[in-house]
Amino acid sequence: MSRKGTHLFYHPLSLKHDTGAGHPERIERVQAITDRLEKTGLKDECEWTTPEPASIELIRANHSGDYIDSIKRVANAGGGPLDADTVISEKSYEAALTAAGACTQAVDSVLEGCSRNAFCLNRPPGHHARRSTAMGFCLFNNIAIGARHALLKQGLERVFIFDWDVHHGNGTQESFYSDPSVFFCSIHQSPLYPGTGTPNEIGGGAGEGSTLNLPVLAGADGKIYESLLEESVLPAIHAFQPELIMISAGFDAHRRDPLAGVLLTDEDFGMLAKGVLKAADSLCDGKVVSVLEGGYDLEGLSGGVEQLIRAQLAYS
């Protein structure tokens, strides 16, 4: 089957997840991205879909029932803080369900031949969310739920997750730490929140060797990331032979970001994306699903996403 196109999954409930005044993970993040895609003409080059909320069955594949109920309960009571960093509002539970649903439906779109690759433009983000714990602005672990869906519902045997958010995706790593069917690879600043992601964290049990952490120091730039991509990430992808590649696409490694100290440019995110997409082109018929994570400077965030989408369109 000849598959073409980049499928973008976005739900307006992302604008109803209100974290309050002064919070870095704010509504304006998504608005800045959609404005950039419209101004550059990229919006019209993608196929847009409003996702359905994920079923509780899908969420339960990665999170405990009690935890899911607790998020719903706090939201129904009007919202409030879940921890020092993670705040929800009345509509946050619904927004989180649609963010997870976007990821599972993006996986279906790519695997069933409706599109060559896809991007999930939704909030709240997900990669810090653990089985029963909200962390780091994250409620449900969207990319982990999408990967489990690919394994359990679509019958895949090997999914590769590349997390380039500047903060280590501890929740995603934990989800698959002992699972050899998912390879988790992360480039992240260290030391930095959440304090995990050391090189000796390589997976456990049957999953030993299927986790690769590549921490960098503050001040790391595009040349360092390109070297890690060429010397570590791409060899890991080729060795694993994935049937699907998923990207936790955070943009807080941008030099403008206020929450970290890495010095990437807009174009560096394009470089990372092109490397992954080229590998996917040869290994798994271009099947790539990217999922929005962090990025808290609006110009850096929207510029990075623009370069990601340009790369995805070039390989669609």
Image (spheres, helix red, strand yellow):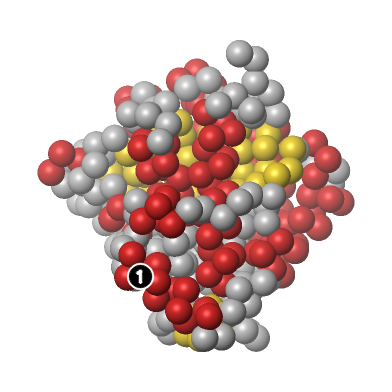
Q: Nearer the viewer, residue 90 or 228?
A: 90
Sort mark 1 into few (<14), some (14-19) or many (20+) by Cα contacts within 10 Å: some
* Image quadrant assignment for residue 281: top right
* Residue found at x 65% / y 20%: 3
- Element under label 1? helix
**Which residue does the image show at 49% across and 25% down from the upper left?**
279
- The quarter of the rendered structure image containing the N terminus is top right
Residue 262 visible in this rendered orientation of the protein: no
Q: Is residue 189 left or right of residue 35?
A: left
The residue at the point 46 percent across, 34 percent down is 245
Residue farthest along the top direction in this orientation: 1
Mark 1, residue position: 67
Is 298 in front, or is 17? 17
Question: In the rendering, at what x and y percent does residue 104 appear?
Answer: 51, 44
- Which residue occupies the foreground of this view, 280 or 68? 68
Q: Residue at x 24, y 42 (%)?
A: 179
Q: Is 148 above or below relative to 279?
A: below
Indicate the quadrant containing the C terminus: top left, top right, bottom left or bottom right: top right
Which amino acid does the dot numbered 1 rest on?
Tyr
* Residue 181 in view, yes or no: yes
**Residue 68 percent coordinates (x, y):** 40, 67
Q: Position of residue 94 (x, y in %)?
A: 57, 66
Res 205 → quadrant: top left
